[in-house]
Image (tube, rainbow, N blue to C red):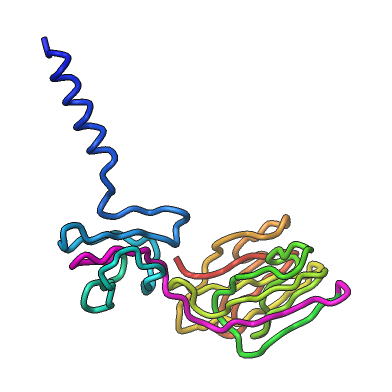
Amino acid sequence: MPTIRTLSLILIALAAWSAAPSAHAQFGDKDSVRCESKDARRETCDTPWPGQTRLTRQLSDTACVQGKTWGATPGKVWVERGCRAEFGPQYSGKEVRCESSDGRYKACGKDLYGNADLIRQLSDTPCREGVSWGTRGGSVWVDKGCRGVFRIGESAGRYSTTCASENGRRQTCAWDSKRGKPLLLEALSKSPCVQGRSWGYDKKQGLWVDEGCRGRFGLR
């Protein structure tokens, strides 16, 4: 039978083990990872995003210098020599501010293609993709009082675009054919998006939607 002293030592050891910080941990959301070099050793941490990685916050007194005390490869980030930091995806693309005044439709910018993200809402009126904002013909559009700042381009290694059939009419949207054929990533409308019937793609017409289909199209 184990003695009380033995049991106490086991419980203390388990508590210390569970309290020890992990070499890599995701926290907050899928776009943030903490990676820590313990005792100056190299540690490698998984990153859930497919694109490039950037340092978002240094946690150590030891300097985190890219290429010296930290670096990244697709799906991984490494740290060493005492660097401890939080990392996130490296975003690229253009930022555009677009505002719907008096609830009216407005298009902003030109030659804006790729994934679009609302990065800051400025209005009290909610900005809902495919309903009060989206992209069309190389521009960002807003409507129904939506005001916001948008990032267009490649975000976290993704490439996608939103295409919407308004009032049940057929609509074509820009798509970079060099990327290959688009897939429906997310349906944004109540009307069903059915490939070959309410949406499709060919090199002549490009990406098209019809019969009220609104969706985000991209690559997996």
Residue 208 vertical position relative to residue 12 in the rendered view, above or below: below
Q: Which residue is pictured at 55% across the width and 74% down the height?
A: 115
Quarter of the figure with the N terminus: top left
For residue 165, above or below residue 21:
below
Q: Quadrant of residue 39?
A: bottom left
Closer-to-camera residue (55/64): 64
Q: Measured from the top left, where is residue 10 in percent x and y?
A: 17, 26
Looking at the image, residue 92 sits to the left or right of residue 25; the answer is: right
Compare residues 80 and 142 and report the one nearer the observer. 80
Residues shaded magenta: 76-103
Which of these two is toward me, 204 or 185? 185
Q: Is residue 108 left or right of residue 177?
A: right
Residue 24 x, y percent position in the rendering: 29, 55
Task: Decide whether residue 128 is among the magenta residues.
Answer: no
Tell me what residue is drawn at x 47 percent, y 76 percent.
91
Q: Quadrant of residue 206?
A: bottom right
Quarter of the rendering occupied by the C terminus: bottom left
